[in-house]
Amino acid sequence: MRFEAVIFDLDGTLLDSMDVWEKIDICFLQKRGLPVPADYVTEICARSFEEAAQYTIDLFGLSEKSEDIIREWNEMAVYEYAHHVKLSPYALEYLIELKKRGMKLAVATGLPGELFLPCLEHNSVLELFDILCSTDEVKRGKEYPDVFELAAQRLGAAPQHCLVFEDVLLAVKSAKQAGMLVCAVYDKYSARYRVQMEQAADFYIADFRDAPLPDADFEDENEKE
């Protein structure tokens, strides 16, 4: 594989965190006496917090403001991310191997910094990343390529030399739209879209044991440059 930079989604990809959000979503809706639609978590996981809040307001006809919903979600999630959310299986080993090979590493997430920074620090991987990007820094969520393009720009890497890891179909497609290589990652919440993800992505993996590594000759070329 010919790439020099790797861009990681967090929730459901690098972080084993989707069960946390399911609990938060259920608690949030139950407090309001609302049912939890079967596809609710799947529908909001590719969206920015603002888009997810607005989707929730529209879906249930809520009179609440999006900023108040986001604040409540964050308050519920802060402790979990700082103390309980772990890396996905074999993710640490893969990150370390990439750094050994001189790869540039980035995060491109829909999470705000108050959640992902303590989590990455708690899992002792924060220092492995060269740059950190959130959809809070761009105008649109991951159904558009904005945050991936921002990550590549900050890394100083051409899009075609970036490999993106994502677990959501819409985000896989938008990363491809940015001209990047994409490795789709299995997640139980997006498992029903596996066929479409395999078709849209360059690779599909069950976990990071099977994650692609860069070609040695391409690494050598980058070192010479």
Image (tube, rainbow, N blue to C red):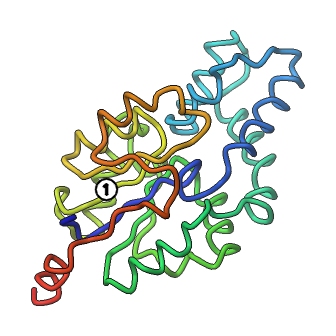
> Residue 79 lies in what quarter of the image?
bottom right
Q: Residue furthest top?
A: 61
Residue in the foreground of this view, choosing between 81 and 187 = 187
- Residue 117, position in %: x, y? 61, 67
Q: Circle 1 is placed at which residue position?
A: 150
Q: Quadrant of the N terminus?
A: bottom left
In the rendered view, tell whether residue 126 sits above or below residue 162.
below
Q: Number of callouts in the render?
A: 1
In the rendered view, tell whether residue 137 sits above or below residue 23.
below
SS of the residue under disc 1:
helix
Left or right: 198 with respect to 38?
left
- Residue 186, position in %: x, y? 52, 44
Q: Quadrant of the C terminus?
A: bottom left
Residue in the foreground of this view, choosing between 217 and 152 = 217
Residue in the foreground of this view, choosing between 214 and 77 = 214
Residue drawn 41% across and 53% down? 165
- Residue 2, position in %: x, y? 18, 66
Specify the amino acid type for callout 1.
Leu
Residue drawn 48% across and 43% down? 167
- Residue 36, position in %: x, y? 76, 19
- Crowdedness near tag 1: few (<14), some (14–19) or many (≥20) residues, C-alpha within 10 Å: some
Residue drawn 48% across and 80% down? 96
Residue in the foreground of this view, choosing between 209 and 96 = 209
Residue drawn 32% across and 83% down? 101
